[in-house]
Image (tube, rainbow, N blue to C red):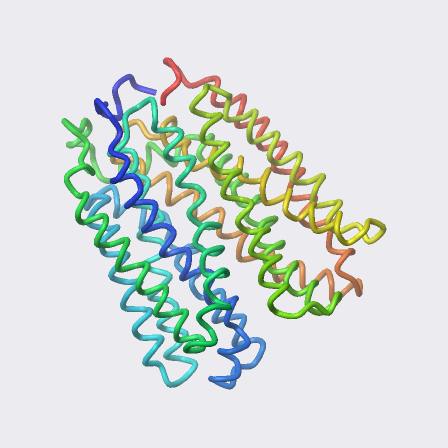
Amino acid sequence: MKAGALQERAGTHWLAVAAAVLCGVAVASNVGKVSIMISALREDFGLSLVEAGWLSSAINVLAVSAAVVFGFSADRIGGLRLCLAGIGFGLAGGAASLLAASFPLLLAARVVEGAGYMAVAVSAPILLSAASRPDDRRFVLGVWAAYMPGGIGLVMIAAPLLQGVGGWRAIWWFAIALLAAGGASVWLQRRHYGFPGTSGANEGAFAVVREVMRQPLAWTLGLLFATWALQHFTLIVWLPTFLREQRGLDMAWVAALSCVMVLANVPGNVIGGALLRRGVARGKLLVLGSGLSGLCMYAAFSPGLPDAVRYLACVAVSFVGGLIPSSILSASTVIARTPRQIGTFQGLSMQIANLGQLLGPPLIAALVAGRGSWEAAAALPVGAAALGTVLGMAAWRMERGYGGPPRP
């Protein structure tokens, strides 16, 4: 890492940090709202199970196909502009959903929301890096990694309260309000999101992408992120279905237990960021998080254990797994030689990770259908955790080869 590549600040502007994180939580609520309201949407629009599945996953279409393009755009036009554009896309998609009268229009609105999600996901880390001093940057980016479980958990909490007021549309209005609050907060803090004396201003556009893409560490971390996304979203999809269909719990209990599991990832991310700030090696956290999540996932899918133990294992997977995204998303302090490369790295990580998120649920479904039980599907998430452990060891070794003192 070139010394001084990311410009230094005298102090961290914590309100600016909070505003950028709020934008992430807002777009994550858009990701989670459909899965919570899928039954209501099927009833209102007459959707088949397949159509409901497409509606749920449509927000990830751009993440899988064009996240690097969004990251490159952030590096070109600036993090603040792309973040505000992302909020705009999210607001437009939410409003279009409220007005939609058919499945195709609802699906199109979901894709627009996906554009907003990707724009914020790759640009907010640039804002966070600019608003924080070097000693705080690892911690700040580690906390940022909690935006997804934070947003999904928040909408899970709000759903039972708001559904009785206005059905699924009340949840959409709630997400719109969060987006508006995030956009307004970032705009009010805009003066804190510039890198003073930014180096590499004359860096060629494609040189930015090439510099990131040619680093094996960036690809290794992206693949490791995919192994974790597969595990986490497998759990998010599997647990509510298992509790409802196999244990016959009512929706209130299913929502509450699922919400606790998702939100357990938030303190895991914060702890990961704090450990990185204290100088714990990133590779060590990745190996620990992947190894422990694999063991806990095996316990969660073990039919011989009591249900209470299996549920606690699910919560433990989410908690210890928080070490993984916090370690990966903060790696821009190592990968990015200049501020203009932060978005490209974030986009690359998101694009690879979303492959795991996209493929995990259908692969689990195929295993369950083929073998006749949920427990038979354990090989997929446990195998992903084992692969993540190996990739964590490789990343640990690669990062040692980066010259210069550790970056904050």
- The relative height of residue 284 versus residue 58 in the rendered view (above or below) is above
Query: Residue 242 appears at what percent x and percent y?
Result: 70, 63
* 214 displayed left or right of 3: right
Res 9 → quadrant: top left
* 322 on left or right of 344: right
**Residue 76 image point, x, y percent:** 21, 43
Which residue occupies the foreground of this view, 199 or 176?
Answer: 176
Q: Is residue 49 above or below residue 383?
A: below
Quadrant where the C terminus lies? Answer: top left
Q: Identify the residue shown where x is 51% and y is 86%.
A: 46
Q: Residue furthest right?
A: 304
Front residue of this view, candidates 42 and 13? 13
Left or right, 103 with reference to 86: right
Q: Is residue 387 above or below residue 29?
A: above
Residue 194 image offset from top left, x and y in percent = 18, 36
Q: Quadrant of residue 117?
A: bottom left
**Figure disc tally:** 0
Expressed as whole percent of the image width and height from the top left, the position of residue 11 reads 24, 25
Q: Residue at x 50, y 61 (%)?
A: 156
381 vs 348, left or right, is right
Q: Residue at x 19, y 46 (%)?
A: 77
Query: Which residue shows up at 41% across the image and 55% down it?
Result: 28
Q: What quarter of the picture does the N terminus occupy?
A: top left
Q: Residue furthest top?
A: 404
